[in-house]
Amino acid sequence: MLVRCDGTRSGYQLLCNGSVYQCVCGHTGCVQSKTATCSKQGFSVLGQCVACGAVGKHTLVAPEAVGFRRTLMQDPQTS
């Protein structure tokens, strides 16, 4: 399970639902194939952070990193 972007797509007013990444500078957002296609876009198609300009310095945000609990399917030993 991945953390999904809750931004809206430009022009459609639908949820983006893309994967969320975090830059080394701490900025988070999704990656899109075009510029300005999501209200919470954090990176260009080339992987450039919109906050600091770093290229290729982002990692996928795991559910545990933002406080989501593990599910029974992910870790059956904890139930």
Image: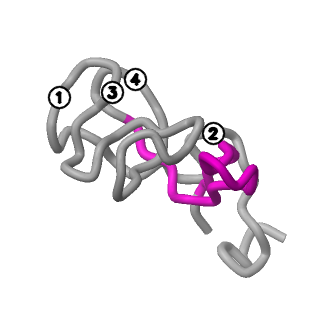
Q: Which residue is the site of mark 1?
A: 54
Name the mark on residue 50.
Answer: 3
The secondary element bearing badge 2 is classed as: helix
Amino acid at the residue labelled 2: Val
- Going from N to C along the chain, the mark reached first, 3 or 2, is 3
Residue 72, image x, y percentages: 78, 75
Q: Which residue is the site of mark 4?
A: 26
Q: Which residue is the site of mark 2?
A: 66
The outermost residue toward the right is 79
- The answer to whether residue 29 is above or below residue 45 is above
Q: Disc 1 and disc 3: Cα gap in Å?
A: 8 Å
Amino acid at the residue labelled 1: Ala
Of tags 2 and 1, the one toward the viewer is 1
In screen coordinates, is 27 left or right of 58? right
Q: Please state the extent of the stretch shown in magenta in the rendering.
A: 3-22
Amino acid at the residue labelled 4: Gly
Residue 7, image x, y percentages: 66, 43
Amino acid at the residue labelled 3: Val
- The answer to whether residue 71 is above or below residue 37 is below
Indicate whether residue 21 is drawn in magenta.
yes
